Image: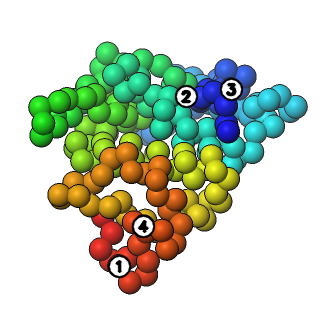
Amino acid sequence: GLGPVSFPPPLQGLKLVSGPMLRRGGGAAAPQRRWEPPPEGSRAAQLSVGELFRQLVRFYHSGVDWRREAVSVRLGRRAPASMHLMLHIIAHEDGRSEAGPGIEDPFDPGRNVGASLTALGMARLHEEFARADALLSSGASLSELLEPWAPPERSGNFAVGDAASHSGHAGSAGSSGPSDEGERH
């Protein structure tokens, strides 16, 4: 297993530096922080791209709390949603509601680019992260993870929770092959 979820990976060890930035149209802009690689030999520097990806999938499968957190590339760390970021509430047909993802537009921090996600889309998002986490936890390769796959349909809706039972491998129930690739959702 991957152990406890701690994402983002140790970004606290990464150093942010300030430097001169140019504004569109000329002139100097206020200094902005930019990413600098972790120190050689540190735990963060030792992680492979594959391990970082596994941690990212595990985090979005089971570690993020959409009621309290938002994705912010601008901040580069876990943080509560900004007071300016519009909250997205997803209403389900059965009367339940849940917080949708808060995804800050880096060019307009008050705009939530996750606001277009529907109840069906949120269910599929959860299902796909569960499927990816199960595959990566079992040692599957990236090519196996990226094989075309469509969830089983039930009464016009996707079957949430079935993701872990499908391996995503060609030939498994629910996998789509070349003949039905055009019908993928």
Q: In the picture shown, does residue 152 fall above or below 46?
A: below
| Mark 3 secondary-structure assignment | loop
N-terminal of the pair, mark 4 or mark 2, is 2
Q: In the picture, residue 118 is in which quadrant? A: top left
**For the point 55% across and 38% down, which residue is it?**
58
The residue identified by callout 2 is: 76
Q: Nearer the viewer, mark 2 or mark 1?
A: 1
Q: Nearer the viewer, mark 3 or mark 1?
A: 1
Q: CA distance from mark 4 to mark 3?
A: 38 Å
Q: Secondary structure at mark 2?
A: loop
Q: Earlier in the sequence, mark 1 or mark 4?
A: 4
Which quadrant is the N terminus positioned in? top right
Gap in angstroms between the C-alphas marked 2 and 3: 11 Å
Which residue position is annotated with label 1?
Answer: 180
Vertical order, 184 against 1 (above or below): below
User: How is the structure coloured here?
Assistant: rainbow
What amino acid is at disc 4? Answer: Ala
Which mark identifies residue 10? 3
Name the image quarter holding residue 153. bottom left
Disc 2 marks a residue whose amino acid type is Gly
Instruction: Please name the residue that numbered disc 4 is placed on.
Output: 173
- Rendering coords of residue 34 (x, y %): 62, 30
Determine whether label 4 and label 3 are within 8 Å by CB.
no
- Give the alpha-carbon distance from disc 3 to disc 1, as whole Å: 42 Å
Q: Give amino acid for label 1.
A: Asp
Q: Earlier in the sequence, mark 2 or mark 1?
A: 2
Query: Badge 1 local density, few (<14 within 10 Å), some, or many (20+)?
Result: few
Image side of residue 58 versus residue 109, left or right: right
Q: Nearer the viewer, mark 2 or mark 3?
A: 3
